[in-house]
Image: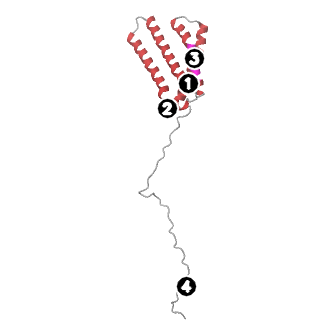
Amino acid sequence: MSDEPKTPSVAPEAPAAQPVQQWQAQPPVDAKVQYVVAHKSLDGLGGWLMFWLIVFAIAGFSYTTSFFTLLGSGASNASDVVYLIFAPLLAVGYIATVVFIAMRKKLARLLAMATIGLSTLYVVVLAIIDMVNNANGNLGTTVGGLVTSVIAGGLMILYFVVSKRVKATLVN
């Protein structure tokens, strides 16, 4: 026999059981929380652009209707003659702007600004005619009305210059 010691036979060991991780009710203190802020898309006809679309549509139809009404009854003073000159231009401008905004055309922005400018010019001309016809009226009130009209027209035009929605929507 041999002098070698005998080793007992060992059965293969079973792998150690892995601990099961339980979900915690609260995240660990070290965990970073990420917030996702959803913002509304500026693309499309909505917000103030929809407001101006409605205002321009109403103005276009009202100038068209009142032009033909005044044309049928006849112009009796200088204000009526000025209205007969400006009304068709304003009606076409407002309605064309509505159509171009609905079609999302870039030209709608320029048309809107031109139509608002023409409308402001019409108000200024009417104020000057009223001031000439009413010589004993208050000059300060008339000048204040003129300045207010020009500022209001400028602010309306400014919307079409700086609005992100206008830039995102009117792209065709």
Indicate the quadrant where residue 92 lies. Answer: top right
The location of residue 39, given as percent across then percent down, is 50, 40
Q: Which residues are magenta?
A: 87-98
Q: Earlier in the sequence, mark 3 or mark 2?
A: 3
- Magenta residues, dominant SS class: helix
Element marked by disc 3: helix
Relative to 28, is 169 above or below? above
Residue mark closest to the camera, 2 vs 4: 4
User: In the figure, is residue 142 to the left or right of 81?
Assistant: left
Element marked by disc 1: helix
Q: Are marks 4 and 1 in contact (CB under 8 Å)?
A: no
Q: Amino acid at mark 1?
A: Ala
- Disc 4 target residue: 9
Distance between the Cα atoms at labels 2 and 4? 81 Å
Q: Amino acid at mark 2?
A: Lys
Q: Are marks 3 and 1 in contact (CB under 8 Å)?
A: no
Nearer to us in this view, 53 or 7: 7
- Residue 164 bears which disc, if any? 2
Q: Amino acid at mark 4?
A: Ser
Q: Earlier in the sequence, mark 3 or mark 1?
A: 3
Relative to 19, is 107 above or below? above
- Residue 91 bears which disc, if any? 3
